[in-house]
Protein backbone atom coordinates (compact mmCIF):
# COMPACT_ATOMS: atom_id res chain seq x y z
CA UNK A 1 0.00 0.00 0.00
CA UNK A 2 1.43 3.37 -1.00
CA UNK A 3 0.70 6.81 0.37
CA UNK A 4 -0.18 9.41 -2.26
CA UNK A 5 -0.62 13.14 -1.71
CA UNK A 6 -2.96 14.78 -4.23
CA UNK A 7 -3.39 18.54 -4.50
CA UNK A 8 -6.38 20.10 -6.23
CA UNK A 9 -6.16 23.70 -7.41
CA UNK A 10 -8.90 26.27 -7.09
CA UNK A 11 -10.17 25.90 -10.66
CA UNK A 12 -10.95 22.20 -9.97
CA UNK A 13 -13.35 23.04 -7.12
CA UNK A 14 -15.39 25.94 -8.47
CA UNK A 15 -18.88 24.38 -8.37
CA UNK A 16 -20.86 21.55 -6.79
CA UNK A 17 -20.49 19.25 -9.81
CA UNK A 18 -16.73 19.63 -9.85
CA UNK A 19 -16.43 19.04 -6.11
CA UNK A 20 -18.49 15.83 -6.48
CA UNK A 21 -16.28 14.68 -9.37
CA UNK A 22 -13.10 15.33 -7.38
CA UNK A 23 -14.60 13.41 -4.45
CA UNK A 24 -15.24 10.45 -6.77
CA UNK A 25 -11.71 10.65 -8.12
CA UNK A 26 -10.23 10.70 -4.62
CA UNK A 27 -12.38 7.73 -3.61
CA UNK A 28 -11.27 5.79 -6.72
CA UNK A 29 -7.65 6.38 -5.72
CA UNK A 30 -8.38 5.14 -2.21
CA UNK A 31 -10.28 2.10 -3.55
CA UNK A 32 -7.28 1.13 -5.63
CA UNK A 33 -5.56 0.39 -2.31
CA UNK A 34 -3.54 3.51 -1.54
CA UNK A 35 -3.67 5.83 1.45
CA UNK A 36 -4.74 9.28 0.27
CA UNK A 37 -4.00 12.72 1.64
CA UNK A 38 -5.62 15.55 -0.31
CA UNK A 39 -4.54 19.19 -0.17
CA UNK A 40 -6.99 21.77 -1.48
CA UNK A 41 -6.76 25.40 -2.60
CA UNK A 42 -9.41 28.06 -2.26
CA UNK A 43 -12.21 27.74 -4.81
CA UNK A 44 -11.86 29.65 -8.10
CA UNK A 45 -10.73 33.23 -7.60
CA UNK A 46 -11.70 33.34 -3.90
CA UNK A 47 -8.23 34.48 -2.80
CA UNK A 48 -8.16 37.37 -5.31
CA UNK A 49 -11.67 38.42 -4.26
CA UNK A 50 -10.73 38.39 -0.57
CA UNK A 51 -7.64 40.51 -1.27
CA UNK A 52 -9.80 43.01 -3.17
CA UNK A 53 -12.32 43.11 -0.38
CA UNK A 54 -9.63 43.75 2.21
CA UNK A 55 -8.27 46.69 0.22
CA UNK A 56 -11.74 48.20 -0.11
CA UNK A 57 -11.90 48.29 3.66
CA UNK A 58 -8.32 49.33 4.40
CA UNK A 59 -5.74 50.48 1.85
CA UNK A 60 -2.94 48.92 3.86
CA UNK A 61 -4.39 45.98 5.76
CA UNK A 62 -2.17 44.43 8.44
CA UNK A 63 -0.47 41.32 7.12
CA UNK A 64 -1.54 39.28 10.15
CA UNK A 65 -5.18 40.07 9.38
CA UNK A 66 -4.67 39.28 5.69
CA UNK A 67 -3.52 35.79 6.68
CA UNK A 68 -6.51 35.43 8.98
CA UNK A 69 -8.76 36.35 6.04
CA UNK A 70 -7.09 34.52 3.15
CA UNK A 71 -6.71 31.20 4.99
CA UNK A 72 -10.51 30.91 5.15
CA UNK A 73 -10.75 30.15 1.40
CA UNK A 74 -8.91 26.86 1.75
CA UNK A 75 -10.92 25.91 4.83
CA UNK A 76 -14.16 26.18 2.84
CA UNK A 77 -12.78 23.87 0.12
CA UNK A 78 -11.55 21.29 2.65
CA UNK A 79 -14.92 21.09 4.43
CA UNK A 80 -16.95 20.91 1.20
CA UNK A 81 -14.78 18.20 -0.37
CA UNK A 82 -14.95 16.16 2.84
CA UNK A 83 -18.76 16.46 2.88
CA UNK A 84 -18.84 15.33 -0.76
CA UNK A 85 -16.76 12.25 0.11
CA UNK A 86 -19.10 11.48 3.03
CA UNK A 87 -22.06 11.78 0.67
CA UNK A 88 -20.45 9.09 -1.50
CA UNK A 89 -20.15 6.79 1.49
CA UNK A 90 -16.51 7.01 2.52
CA UNK A 91 -14.76 8.09 5.71
CA UNK A 92 -12.86 11.34 5.46
CA UNK A 93 -11.70 14.07 7.85
CA UNK A 94 -10.66 17.62 7.06
CA UNK A 95 -7.97 19.60 8.86
CA UNK A 96 -6.72 23.17 8.80
CA UNK A 97 -2.98 23.85 8.61
CA UNK A 98 -3.01 24.51 12.35
CA UNK A 99 -4.70 21.20 13.13
CA UNK A 100 -2.14 19.34 11.03
CA UNK A 101 0.66 21.06 12.95
CA UNK A 102 2.24 23.02 10.09
CA UNK A 103 4.57 25.26 12.13
CA UNK A 104 5.92 28.29 10.28
CA UNK A 105 7.94 31.39 11.04
CA UNK A 106 6.05 34.64 11.57
CA UNK A 107 6.59 36.28 8.17
CA UNK A 108 2.93 36.82 7.44
CA UNK A 109 1.75 36.36 3.80
CA UNK A 110 5.00 34.54 2.86
CA UNK A 111 5.78 32.30 5.84
CA UNK A 112 8.36 29.53 5.75
CA UNK A 113 7.46 26.05 7.01
CA UNK A 114 9.69 25.08 9.94
CA UNK A 115 8.21 21.78 11.02
CA UNK A 116 5.21 19.56 10.41
CA UNK A 117 3.85 17.31 13.11
CA UNK A 118 1.52 15.15 11.04
CA UNK A 119 0.36 12.99 13.98
CA UNK A 120 -3.33 13.65 13.46
CA UNK A 121 -3.02 12.89 9.74
CA UNK A 122 -1.31 9.59 10.46
CA UNK A 123 -3.93 8.65 13.08
CA UNK A 124 -6.77 9.21 10.66
CA UNK A 125 -4.98 7.36 7.84
CA UNK A 126 -4.52 4.38 10.18
CA UNK A 127 -8.25 4.41 10.80
CA UNK A 128 -8.81 4.16 7.04
CA UNK A 129 -9.89 7.76 6.50
CA UNK A 130 -9.12 9.93 3.51
CA UNK A 131 -7.49 13.05 4.94
CA UNK A 132 -8.25 16.47 3.45
CA UNK A 133 -5.93 19.34 4.39
CA UNK A 134 -6.54 23.05 3.77
CA UNK A 135 -3.50 24.23 1.77
CA UNK A 136 -1.56 27.50 1.88
CA UNK A 137 -1.58 27.94 5.66
CA UNK A 138 0.23 27.25 8.89
CA UNK A 139 0.64 28.60 12.40
CA UNK A 140 3.55 30.45 14.00
CA UNK A 141 4.95 29.81 17.47
CA UNK A 142 2.67 32.44 18.97
CA UNK A 143 -0.39 30.74 17.55
CA UNK A 144 -1.07 33.21 14.74
CA UNK A 145 -2.37 31.91 11.42
CA UNK A 146 0.14 32.41 8.60
CA UNK A 147 0.01 31.87 4.82
CA UNK A 148 2.78 30.59 2.56
CA UNK A 149 2.68 32.98 -0.41
CA UNK A 150 0.54 32.90 -3.56
CA UNK A 151 0.33 29.38 -4.95
CA UNK A 152 1.23 28.11 -1.47
CA UNK A 153 -1.05 25.04 -1.54
CA UNK A 154 1.54 23.40 -3.79
CA UNK A 155 4.05 23.88 -0.98
CA UNK A 156 1.67 22.38 1.61
CA UNK A 157 1.23 19.33 -0.62
CA UNK A 158 4.93 18.75 -1.29
CA UNK A 159 5.88 19.35 2.36
CA UNK A 160 3.27 16.86 3.57
CA UNK A 161 4.45 14.36 0.95
CA UNK A 162 8.02 14.78 2.27
CA UNK A 163 7.05 14.40 5.92
CA UNK A 164 4.76 11.42 5.30
CA UNK A 165 7.31 9.80 3.00
CA UNK A 166 4.69 9.62 0.27
CA UNK A 167 5.38 7.61 -2.84
CA UNK A 168 4.53 10.68 -4.96
CA UNK A 169 2.78 14.04 -4.91
CA UNK A 170 0.20 14.66 -7.63
CA UNK A 171 -0.53 18.29 -8.48
CA UNK A 172 -3.93 18.20 -10.16
CA UNK A 173 -4.82 21.33 -12.09
CA UNK A 174 -6.56 22.75 -15.17
CA UNK A 175 -3.87 21.75 -17.70
CA UNK A 176 -2.58 18.31 -18.73
CA UNK A 177 0.87 18.97 -17.29
CA UNK A 178 3.81 21.31 -17.71
CA UNK A 179 3.96 22.66 -21.25
CA UNK A 180 6.83 24.06 -23.32
CA UNK A 181 5.28 27.47 -22.53
CA UNK A 182 2.11 28.74 -20.84
CA UNK A 183 -0.57 27.48 -23.28
CA UNK A 184 -2.57 30.64 -22.60
CA UNK A 185 0.30 32.66 -24.10
CA UNK A 186 1.63 30.25 -26.71
CA UNK A 187 -1.34 28.21 -28.03
CA UNK A 188 0.88 25.71 -29.89
CA UNK A 189 2.78 24.81 -26.68
CA UNK A 190 3.26 21.07 -26.16
CA UNK A 191 2.93 19.02 -23.00
CA UNK A 192 6.24 17.74 -21.65
CA UNK A 193 6.56 14.18 -20.31
CA UNK A 194 9.49 14.89 -18.01
CA UNK A 195 11.16 18.00 -16.61
CA UNK A 196 14.10 18.00 -14.18
CA UNK A 197 13.78 19.61 -10.75
CA UNK A 198 16.31 22.29 -11.71
CA UNK A 199 14.54 23.14 -14.95
CA UNK A 200 11.18 23.28 -13.20
CA UNK A 201 12.59 25.46 -10.46
CA UNK A 202 13.90 27.95 -13.04
CA UNK A 203 10.67 27.84 -15.04
CA UNK A 204 8.49 28.33 -11.95
CA UNK A 205 10.67 31.21 -10.69
CA UNK A 206 10.54 32.86 -14.11
CA UNK A 207 6.76 32.84 -14.53
CA UNK A 208 5.49 29.26 -15.11
CA UNK A 209 3.03 29.51 -12.24
CA UNK A 210 1.65 26.02 -12.88
CA UNK A 211 3.86 25.20 -9.87
CA UNK A 212 4.90 27.40 -6.95
CA UNK A 213 8.70 27.69 -7.13
CA UNK A 214 9.16 27.04 -3.40
CA UNK A 215 7.30 23.74 -3.76
CA UNK A 216 9.77 22.63 -6.43
CA UNK A 217 12.69 23.57 -4.18
CA UNK A 218 11.17 21.47 -1.40
CA UNK A 219 10.49 18.54 -3.76
CA UNK A 220 14.11 18.60 -4.93
CA UNK A 221 15.45 18.79 -1.37
CA UNK A 222 13.48 15.78 -0.20
CA UNK A 223 13.44 13.92 -3.57
CA UNK A 224 9.63 13.94 -3.72
CA UNK A 225 8.52 12.70 -7.15
CA UNK A 226 6.04 15.23 -8.56
CA UNK A 227 3.35 14.45 -11.11
CA UNK A 228 1.52 17.43 -12.63
CA UNK A 229 -1.72 16.34 -14.27
CA UNK A 230 -5.25 17.39 -15.18
CA UNK A 231 -7.85 17.13 -12.40
CA UNK A 232 -10.48 15.70 -14.70
CA UNK A 233 -8.53 13.38 -16.97
CA UNK A 234 -6.74 10.07 -16.53
CA UNK A 235 -3.97 10.98 -18.99
CA UNK A 236 -0.44 10.88 -17.69
CA UNK A 237 0.85 14.38 -17.07
CA UNK A 238 4.40 15.62 -16.50
CA UNK A 239 6.88 14.00 -14.12
CA UNK A 240 9.34 16.25 -12.32
CA UNK A 241 12.36 14.10 -11.61
CA UNK A 242 16.07 14.11 -10.97
CA UNK A 243 17.97 14.86 -14.16
CA UNK A 244 19.60 12.06 -16.07
CA UNK A 245 22.09 12.14 -18.93
CA UNK A 246 19.46 11.73 -21.65
CA UNK A 247 17.75 14.94 -20.57
CA UNK A 248 20.79 16.92 -21.71
CA UNK A 249 19.99 16.14 -25.35
CA UNK A 250 17.16 18.66 -25.21
CA UNK A 251 18.50 22.17 -25.70
CA UNK A 252 15.48 24.15 -24.55
CA UNK A 253 12.86 22.49 -22.35
CA UNK A 254 10.58 25.47 -22.02
CA UNK A 255 9.96 29.18 -22.38
CA UNK A 256 8.60 31.51 -19.75
CA UNK A 257 7.20 35.02 -19.75
CA UNK A 258 6.87 37.12 -16.64
CA UNK A 259 5.49 40.60 -16.21
CA UNK A 260 6.27 40.68 -12.52
CA UNK A 261 9.48 42.72 -12.76
CA UNK A 262 10.25 46.44 -13.05
CA UNK A 263 13.46 48.22 -13.96
CA UNK A 264 15.29 50.98 -12.08
CA UNK A 265 18.12 52.90 -13.77
CA UNK A 266 20.88 55.11 -12.44
CA UNK A 267 22.14 57.47 -15.16
CA UNK A 268 25.53 59.20 -15.24
CA UNK A 269 27.09 57.48 -12.22
CA UNK A 270 30.81 58.13 -11.68
CA UNK A 271 32.69 55.08 -12.80
CA UNK A 272 34.74 54.45 -9.67
CA UNK A 273 35.02 51.73 -7.03
CA UNK A 274 32.35 51.64 -4.36
CA UNK A 275 29.38 53.17 -6.20
CA UNK A 276 27.67 49.86 -7.05
CA UNK A 277 28.41 48.59 -3.54
CA UNK A 278 26.70 51.62 -2.00
CA UNK A 279 23.66 51.34 -4.26
CA UNK A 280 23.08 47.63 -3.75
CA UNK A 281 23.80 47.76 -0.02
CA UNK A 282 20.99 50.29 0.25
CA UNK A 283 18.66 48.12 -1.83
CA UNK A 284 19.52 45.06 0.28
CA UNK A 285 18.98 46.97 3.52
CA UNK A 286 15.40 47.58 2.40
CA UNK A 287 15.01 43.80 2.02
CA UNK A 288 14.58 44.04 -1.75
CA UNK A 289 15.82 41.21 -3.98
CA UNK A 290 17.46 42.25 -7.23
CA UNK A 291 17.06 39.94 -10.22
CA UNK A 292 19.14 41.35 -13.07
CA UNK A 293 21.86 44.00 -13.17
CA UNK A 294 23.65 45.65 -16.10
CA UNK A 295 26.24 48.39 -16.18
CA UNK A 296 27.06 50.17 -19.43
CA UNK A 297 30.58 50.85 -20.63
CA UNK A 298 31.57 54.21 -19.19
CA UNK A 299 31.82 57.35 -21.29
CA UNK A 300 33.92 60.23 -19.94
CA UNK A 301 34.07 58.61 -16.52
CA UNK A 302 30.28 58.18 -16.26
CA UNK A 303 28.19 55.04 -16.71
CA UNK A 304 24.60 53.82 -16.28
CA UNK A 305 23.50 51.01 -13.95
CA UNK A 306 20.11 49.32 -14.36
CA UNK A 307 18.57 46.57 -12.27
CA UNK A 308 15.25 44.79 -11.97
CA UNK A 309 13.15 44.12 -8.88
CA UNK A 310 9.70 42.60 -8.28
CA UNK A 311 6.98 45.08 -9.28
CA UNK A 312 5.71 45.12 -5.71
CA UNK A 313 9.11 46.41 -4.51
CA UNK A 314 9.43 49.17 -7.11
CA UNK A 315 8.34 52.12 -4.91
CA UNK A 316 10.75 51.11 -2.16
CA UNK A 317 13.57 50.55 -4.68
CA UNK A 318 13.10 54.01 -6.23
CA UNK A 319 13.14 55.63 -2.79
CA UNK A 320 16.39 53.85 -1.91
CA UNK A 321 17.97 54.67 -5.28
CA UNK A 322 17.11 58.38 -4.84
CA UNK A 323 18.62 58.33 -1.37
CA UNK A 324 21.89 56.88 -2.68
CA UNK A 325 21.84 59.32 -5.61
CA UNK A 326 21.79 62.23 -3.15
CA UNK A 327 24.68 60.67 -1.20
CA UNK A 328 26.89 60.32 -4.28
CA UNK A 329 26.23 63.77 -5.68
CA UNK A 330 22.93 63.49 -7.53
CA UNK A 331 22.70 61.25 -10.59
CA UNK A 332 19.40 60.77 -12.44
CA UNK A 333 17.13 57.90 -11.33
CA UNK A 334 14.45 56.52 -13.66
CA UNK A 335 12.05 53.57 -13.47
CA UNK A 336 10.06 51.48 -15.95
CA UNK A 337 7.34 49.04 -14.93
CA UNK A 338 6.37 48.26 -18.54
CA UNK A 339 8.86 45.45 -19.03
CA UNK A 340 8.66 41.68 -19.45
CA UNK A 341 11.17 38.93 -18.82
CA UNK A 342 11.22 36.26 -21.52
CA UNK A 343 13.45 33.27 -20.79
CA UNK A 344 14.50 29.92 -22.19
CA UNK A 345 15.30 27.08 -19.80
CA UNK A 346 17.02 23.74 -20.42
CA UNK A 347 19.75 21.71 -18.76
CA UNK A 348 21.15 20.81 -22.18
CA UNK A 349 21.99 24.36 -23.20
CA UNK A 350 25.30 24.48 -21.37
CA UNK A 351 26.64 21.69 -23.58
CA UNK A 352 25.63 23.26 -26.88
CA UNK A 353 26.87 26.43 -28.51
CA UNK A 354 24.76 28.96 -30.34
CA UNK A 355 21.66 28.81 -28.15
CA UNK A 356 21.85 32.47 -27.17
CA UNK A 357 22.44 33.49 -30.78
CA UNK A 358 19.28 31.60 -31.84
CA UNK A 359 17.22 33.27 -29.14
CA UNK A 360 18.46 36.77 -30.01
CA UNK A 361 17.90 36.10 -33.73
CA UNK A 362 14.28 35.14 -33.03
CA UNK A 363 13.80 38.46 -31.22
CA UNK A 364 15.60 40.46 -33.93
CA UNK A 365 13.44 38.92 -36.66
CA UNK A 366 10.35 40.19 -34.82
CA UNK A 367 11.90 43.62 -34.29
CA UNK A 368 11.94 43.13 -30.50
CA UNK A 369 14.60 45.19 -28.75
CA UNK A 370 16.50 43.51 -25.89
CA UNK A 371 17.00 45.83 -22.92
CA UNK A 372 18.89 43.49 -20.58
CA UNK A 373 20.29 39.96 -20.70
CA UNK A 374 21.20 37.53 -17.95
CA UNK A 375 22.33 33.94 -18.16
CA UNK A 376 22.97 30.93 -15.94
CA UNK A 377 24.06 27.43 -16.88
CA UNK A 378 20.49 26.40 -17.64
CA UNK A 379 18.70 29.60 -18.65
CA UNK A 380 18.93 32.78 -20.71
CA UNK A 381 16.65 35.69 -19.82
CA UNK A 382 15.98 38.85 -21.81
CA UNK A 383 14.15 41.92 -20.61
CA UNK A 384 11.98 43.37 -23.37
CA UNK A 385 9.20 45.91 -23.48
CA UNK A 386 5.99 44.53 -21.94
CA UNK A 387 4.05 45.10 -25.16
CA UNK A 388 6.52 42.82 -27.00
CA UNK A 389 6.38 40.02 -24.38
CA UNK A 390 3.88 37.65 -26.03
CA UNK A 391 5.30 38.19 -29.50
CA UNK A 392 8.79 37.47 -28.15
CA UNK A 393 7.72 34.25 -26.37
CA UNK A 394 5.92 32.96 -29.47
CA UNK A 395 8.83 33.79 -31.79
CA UNK A 396 11.35 32.00 -29.56
CA UNK A 397 9.00 29.02 -29.20
CA UNK A 398 8.83 28.71 -32.99
CA UNK A 399 12.58 29.24 -33.45
CA UNK A 400 13.41 26.31 -31.17
CA UNK A 401 10.69 24.16 -32.79
CA UNK A 402 8.98 23.45 -29.47
CA UNK A 403 5.39 23.39 -30.75
CA UNK A 404 3.12 20.53 -31.74
CA UNK A 405 3.28 21.29 -35.41
CA UNK A 406 7.05 21.03 -35.65
P1 LIG B 1 -4.21 25.81 -9.76
O1 LIG B 1 -5.40 26.66 -9.44
O2 LIG B 1 -4.57 24.40 -10.09
O3 LIG B 1 -3.11 25.91 -8.74
P2 LIG B 1 -2.76 27.62 -11.49
O4 LIG B 1 -3.65 28.61 -12.18
O5 LIG B 1 -1.96 28.08 -10.33
O6 LIG B 1 -3.66 26.35 -11.14
O7 LIG B 1 -1.77 26.96 -12.55
C1 LIG B 1 -2.25 26.43 -13.77
C2 LIG B 1 -2.01 27.43 -14.89
O8 LIG B 1 -0.60 27.64 -15.04
C3 LIG B 1 -2.42 26.96 -16.26
O9 LIG B 1 -3.80 27.21 -16.51
C4 LIG B 1 -1.51 27.76 -17.19
O10 LIG B 1 -2.15 28.87 -17.79
C5 LIG B 1 -0.40 28.28 -16.27
N1 LIG B 1 0.93 27.98 -16.79
C6 LIG B 1 1.96 28.88 -16.84
N2 LIG B 1 3.03 28.32 -17.39
C7 LIG B 1 2.71 27.04 -17.71
C8 LIG B 1 3.41 25.96 -18.30
N3 LIG B 1 4.67 26.07 -18.71
N4 LIG B 1 2.76 24.78 -18.45
C9 LIG B 1 1.49 24.63 -18.04
N5 LIG B 1 0.76 25.63 -17.48
C10 LIG B 1 1.36 26.83 -17.32
N1 LIG C 1 -5.37 30.22 -2.66
C1 LIG C 1 -3.97 30.59 -2.68
C2 LIG C 1 -3.68 31.46 -3.89
O1 LIG C 1 -4.57 31.75 -4.66
C3 LIG C 1 -3.07 29.42 -2.60
C4 LIG C 1 -3.12 28.47 -3.78
O2 LIG C 1 -4.04 28.53 -4.60
O3 LIG C 1 -2.23 27.63 -3.91
O4 LIG C 1 -2.57 31.89 -4.05
MG1 LIG D 1 -1.40 27.23 -8.45
Image (spheres, helix red, strand yellow):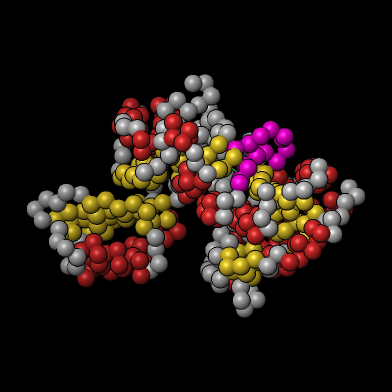
Q: In percent of the image, x 55 and y 36: which residue is there?
A: 194
Q: Nearer the viewer, residue 305 or 102?
A: 102
Residue 241, how many percent across, how many down?
55, 43
Residue sitting at x 16%, y 49%: 297
Inspect this view and state whether residue 356 appears: yes
Q: Residue 349: x and y, percent?
A: 38, 36
Q: In the rendered image, is residue 23 in sight?
A: no
Residue furthest toward the bottom?
A: 142
- Horizontal and vertical percent position of residue 89: 91, 50
Q: Position of residue 110 (x, y in %)?
A: 54, 63
Does 12 sit left or right of 318 as displayed?
A: right
Left or right position of 393 against 173: left
- Relative to 128, is 69 on the left or the right? left
Q: Quadrant of residue 387?
A: top left
Q: Is residue 228 magenta-colored?
A: yes
Toward the top, the furthest residue is: 405
Q: From what the image shows, is residue 20 above or below residue 404?
A: below
Residue lying farthest left?
300
- Number of labels in the image equals 0
Residue 303: name its quadrant. bottom left
* Segment tinted magenta in the rendering: 225-238
Residue at 38% in and 46% down: 339
Is residue 26 in the magenta section? Answer: no
Q: Residue at x 45, y 25 (%)?
A: 401
- Residue 29 found in image quarter: top right
Amino acid sequence: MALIVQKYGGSSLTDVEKIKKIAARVIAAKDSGDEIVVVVSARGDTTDKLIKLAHQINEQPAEREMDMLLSTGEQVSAALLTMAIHAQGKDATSFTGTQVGIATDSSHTRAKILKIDAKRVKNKLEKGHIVIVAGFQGIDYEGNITTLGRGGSDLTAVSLAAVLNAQRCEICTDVEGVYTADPRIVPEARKLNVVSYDEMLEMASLGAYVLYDRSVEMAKRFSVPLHIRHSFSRNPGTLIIKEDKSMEDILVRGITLSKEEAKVSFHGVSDKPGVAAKLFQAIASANISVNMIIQNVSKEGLSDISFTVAKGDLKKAIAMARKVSRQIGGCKVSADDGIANVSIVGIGMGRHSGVAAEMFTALAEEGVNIQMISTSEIKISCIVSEKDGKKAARAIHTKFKLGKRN
